[in-house]
Amino acid sequence: MSFLHRHSWLTPYLLLAPGIAFLVLFFVVPLYYLGYTSLQEGTVQVGYTFNWAWDNYTSAFSTYREQFFRSLQYAGIATILALLISYPLTYWIAFRGGRWKNLLLLFIIAPFFVTYLIRTLAWQNILADDGFVVGVLQALGIVADDGRLLATSTAVIAGITYNFLPFMALPLYVALEQIDPRLIEAAKDLYSSSTKAFLRVTLPLSMPGVIAGTLLTFIPAAGDFINAELLGTPNQAMIGNVIQSKFLEITDYGQAAAMSVILMAVILLLIAVYTRILGTERMAG
Amino acid sequence: MNYPFERIHGPMTRKQLLRRAAVGGATLSLPGLLAACGGEGGIEGEQAATGAGETTVVQELADEITVSNWPFYIDQNDDATSFPTLDQFTQETGVKVNYLEDINSNEEFFGEIQAPLSRGQGIDRDIIVPTAWLAARLLDLGYLQKLDKSAIPNIENLEDTLASPPWDPNRDYSLPWQSYITGVGYDPKKVGGEITSVEQLLDPALKGKVTMLDSMEDTAALFMLEMGGDVANPDQTMFNEICEKLKKAVDDGQIRQFTGNDYTGLLAGGDAWASLAWSGDIVILQADNPNLEFRIPDAGGISSVDTMVIPTGGDVFTASTFMNFFYDPAIAAQVAAYVNYITPVKGTKEAIAEIDPALAENPLIFPPPDVLENLHEFSAEAIENPEFQEQWQAVIGV
């Protein structure tokens, strides 16, 4: 008899072991280290010491409250925009795409084979003050003659929306694609209008996709700094920019870590409320 | 991490190069990504124990040397496909040069290299070229290795004025690469006239078309000179006043961005009409926008020395050989003729006259005494002062 046969109760744990080891190594340990760092004080010159520096938290929040709220606001608007753009798009692909479905999906993803940075830099060129887009919009009176697109909140939010669109579109597509069209037919057979069939059948069935998509978009968007750096001005700085500069330029690791912890806590809180309202069981579909 | 360049195949025009370089510049301003890629890995921890000064030098050339420098800081051939002086170095020594233009700002670069260096690990680079104040900090932290002066006979060509800075009086650890001037780069056609003072950048007519440098030793210092202050010994009240003034300009949307070397793309592309800028950059950007001009404000310009140093883990003998090569006046002349910065190598003026006599009279490369008198350097202590840093960070928005 082998060891495993005699101790068969061990099998599930052994099967879980790689996953648990992974989580401990790449989640628990870094999280502990982040928390530990966030309570340190010091500079590169004198070294960093752990002394329960709660001050990192209070000063981080009081000094950078504006950037915190701005991040949540930008990420929130971008998430809603991405949802409004993705839903009709993926709905159409899922129900009307026919044999072109895969090709159409590829079109959504294709631009994202280019790296994030280059895509964002491309927007810098597209939205340039002397560029074609601004010129046309000025001629149409949408942008003031001395106005601009680049280096505005609009550009930053648009950049975030664009860059995170696939994170919204793909889960939505999966949810919509799984819906059996016969359910909608049945609703109509029972004298439901198209609008009502959508609201009562399609939309509820697609909720897992909506929830997954909004979370996948909002969470990374709230911590993003590239769009604000390349498409904004100091007035558009997000908390990601502050953390980036604290970590890598000022090398104030304590405060940078404290800000990361605060950001994480705020996001967790928002998600808790959000899933409470919409119901977690829907996430699982 | 200079992948925008690596993606480019075939020959390209200088104009294209500048565009791409500008893109590269912006790329480099994202140390987060750099750190994510370059990361903690560093190189073999072998050198770990070697602190500054206790290096054992192997006098044998390595196959390759990696040099980190600022963009637009070395000569390129006409179609910008190669660096002629680096090719000459390879021909002469057989050492290939992996030349990275990945320093966009001192602060960012320090953030990037600090973690591995603090653990005694190398950073995959044999020579880096920070500005003097940062070189001094790196030396102070024990991150640098002594030069092998036996490999640098050309050190005798070092300009006397640069021979003994207080932080490295015998130049045991450092050698100047070029000195730069910070002033205003602008397009007179768009601005509608001449700019003679940094105060003009706050004119509402230029709203949203102005960029400034994210380094206080450049931006705050220029405004301090404007107010008649002493940048070698900055006054706290005056510094406060400047921070307030600039913060207001940010809030009003007057200042479009604070940048590192990546202002070049904005200025060349027309998104910025006037930028606080480094002298030689503007000369190179003129290829893209011939209207651009560089001006040292009447109240004074800022100048400092970008300095070659060998970080922990770098190959001292090969790095020293490289430095020696660039202290040959004939080579220094080729570099200076292209980059238009102040060369630290004696005899360059004579050598450059053979390339183009007009260059020997170029006030940016060989500033006449009246220009030199008007150039100042911001206090290194002030840069290291945490209160100044914090105030300055609040101005630039992060």
Image (cartoon, coloured by chain):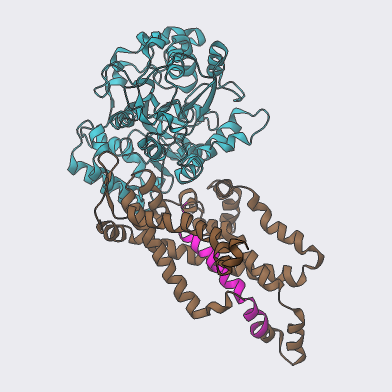
In the rendered image, residue B96, in percent from the top left (x then y), is placed at 56, 20
Residue A97 is drawn in which quadrant?
bottom right
Residue occupying the point 38% across, 57% down: A32
Number of numbered discs visible in the structure rendering:
0
Residue occupying the point 55% across, 28% down: B287
Please indicate whether residue A87 sits to the left or right of residue B284 in the image: right
Compared to residue A9, the image places residue A59 above or below, namely above
B54, B66: nearer the viewer: B54
Residue B300 is drawn in which quadrant?
top left
Single out the residue that lies furthest toward the right: A99
Chain B's colour?
cyan
Q: Which chain does brown denote in the image?
A: A
In magenta, the rendered stretch is A199-225
Compared to residue A194, the image places residue B377 above or below, namely above
A86, B377: nearer the viewer: A86
In the rendered image, residue B86, in percent from the top left (x then y), is placed at 53, 19
In the rendered image, residue B369, in percent from the top left (x then y), is placed at 30, 16
A128, A86: nearer the viewer: A86
Please indicate whether residue B112 sits to the left or right of residue B225 in the image: right
Compared to residue A236, the image places residue B304 above or below, namely above
Please indicate whether residue A39 sits to the left or right of residue A71 in the image: left
Q: Is A208 colored magenta in this rendering?
A: yes
Q: Is A104 colored magenta in this rendering?
A: no
Visible residue check, residue A246 = yes
